[in-house]
Amino acid sequence: MSTQAEKNYSEVKQDDQLKRKENHVHPNALKRFRYSQDLVIEKSFNWSQMWRLLGYLKPYSKSLVPLSIIVVLLTTAIRLFIPVIIGVYILEQAISEKNSNLLTTLVLSISAMYLISYIANILRISWLNKLGQHVIYDLRKHLFTHVQGLSHRFFDQRSAGSILVRILNDVNSLQELFTNGIINLLMDCIMLVGIVVILFTLSPPLALAVMITVPIMFLISTKLRRSIRRSWQTVRHRQSSLNSHLNESLQGIRVTQSFTQEKENMAFFDGVNTGNYEAWRVATQKNATFRPLVEMTNAVGTAILIWFGAILIGNGQISIGEFVSFAFYLGMFWEPISRLGQVYNQLLIGMASSERIFEFLDEKPLIDEKEKAIQLAEIKGQIEFENVEFSYDNKRKALNGISLEMKAGQTVALVGHTGSGKTTIANLISRFYDATGGKVKIDGHDIRDISVKNLRSQISIVLQDTFIFSGTIMENIRFGRPDAADEEVIEAAKAIGADPFIQKLPNGYFTEVEERGNILSVGERQLLSFARALLADPRILILDEATASIDTETEVKIQNALRTLLKGRTSIIIAHRLSTIREADQIFVLENGHILESGNHDHLMMKKGEYFGLISAQFKMLNA
């Protein structure tokens, strides 16, 4: 872990409340907590990145943005004009000269201005909320779309929880910035400039006197910026850890309960939760220091106004009306400064979140799509590996220069011990990864020259751990081909023997299943995945230990269906069961990324080599 990450954890541990909680936390849990923290992104406040974030306003630059700016300018102008009317015109002309007609006119004018300002504020709030929601929608859509297109290696290196935090929490944290922060920043800047100009117009000496506190406040607040920004970064990372742990715990709840590790898991959660609490406490405390600083400066400025203003009035350098107007403007002066502090805090939060969002958006897929990628109307299914090498971590090779050929329409089985490279071959065919050496070809074309979408649309994969989505049985099978009719879905289910158990469900094909399909047995979920893959009508079908979790009776149904359904397709079967692989046209035996043997079942059994040993060991285990 980095020195900075260690330092962050050390700072959290030193807090008294955290120390008290640690007395109840298991040491191993604390160790897991420490090493679960995301590393803080070391970047200065990057305005170019903020401009990049503001680029999401561009689609609305001809609608909501100008409308919001117009009403902001209108309300700002009204607020700047009213104190002059009250101080100079009402006090010095209408009241002092006892001009009731002028007084009535001015009062009605001010009332009309307030009414206009009220209506403009309603429109401003409505339009800004709409603008903020549109931008958040666009940003989240862009981020999710981008993440979906990233390579498998991206997901190998990150937990699902940490990805969820960035798509949900980090994007949500920008909502206030887009809803109020940006336009308020414009409004407050205009307000400040206008007030300063008016103050110096009314009385330059008095303006200089009350402004003496502003540089002092600026210097103090500047020192807080880096600390506040860093605190909000820490908050985002602690939230990521908390979300990751919750996601992991909920998915693994059965394992936790079966090993009675609830106490250990709760101890770890307590450590992560405490870290999140502490990060928020520190960040909000630092934020809270800004407003009292503004109020203290306001108090000093007001005292100077009263003291020095009285002297100027006594000397005849300023009138009572001008003094009253000056007092109004000075009171208004500190309001936008205070709001600017809040906006700056929003910018800090937004920067911490945008850094994490843009870190994902800047992530490039390792699978490069060529500009003029080949579009194959229909893949025949001939697959060739030419001296292919591959490594997941650039250290240990999963494949060591293997060469093989799978003819179109053949059923090919890959067998070998765990880690021998079977699944890696399937991953390279689907182009979830690119070979680090050699070539993978389909129908004579280098797989890197074929459009990824075009390639994967003609390949179906059935995994051992099948995934069932929330929704109906019908929707889960149709996931393989969204435009399929209900009748086609049912036919696919019947073909692989899933129809009988589906018909017994409360609502048949329209029975709702929750995430991961927990109301279904392992075998039933696997049958659905077969139906999903077969409905897609792929030219290449990959079965990765797809029958490992299915009972013998169910496997017989699948084997009968596969004899017909695999006909005419190139099928790659990764399995250990003899019943699944014995009828394959070609069998490749792998070990440590090398091909040891190849041939059909009878040929390999006659050789009495590695394959013979694997099958013999399986028979002994079954007959034991």
Image (tube, grey):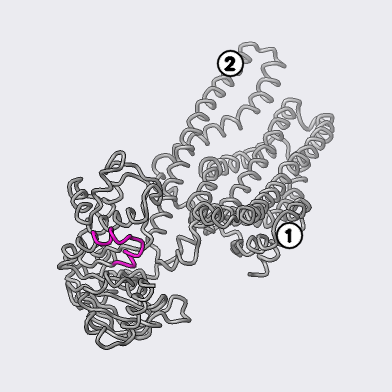
Left/right placement of residue 516 relative to residue 200 reads left
- Residue at image position (31%, 50%) is 476
Query: How many residues crowd mark 2 within 10 Å: few (<14), some (14–19), many (20+)?
Result: few
How many residues crowd around disc 1 within 10 Å: few (fewer than 14), some, or many (20 or more)? few
Location of residue 439 in the rendering, given as x and y in whole percent from the top left corner: 30, 81
| Residue 473: image location, x then y, percent | 30, 46
Residue visible at 39% across and 70% down in the picture: 366
Q: Quadrant of the N terminus?
A: bottom right
Could you tell which of marks 2 and 1 lies nearer the N-terminus?
1
Which three-letter amino acid code belongs to the residue tagged 1?
Glu
Q: Which mark is residue 105?
A: 2
On the image, the x and y values in percent for residue 125 come to: 51, 33
Image point 67% across, 66% down: which residue?
4
Q: CA distance from mark 2 to mark 1?
A: 63 Å
For numbered disc 1, what is the local secondary structure? Answer: helix
Q: Position of residue 63 (x, y in %)?
A: 40, 40
**Residue corresponding to mark 1:** 11
Q: Magenta segment: does it hold 546?
A: yes
For the C terminus, the quadrant is bottom left
Q: Nearer the viewer, mark 2 or mark 1?
A: 1
Amino acid tagged 2: Thr
Residue at 25% of width from left, 77% of height from top? 441
Q: Is residue 237 left or right of residue 568?
A: right
Placement of 527 over or under 189, stated as above or below? below
Rendering quarter of residue 145: bottom left
Say above or below: 115 vs 242: above
Write down the region rendered in magenta.
Answer: 543-557
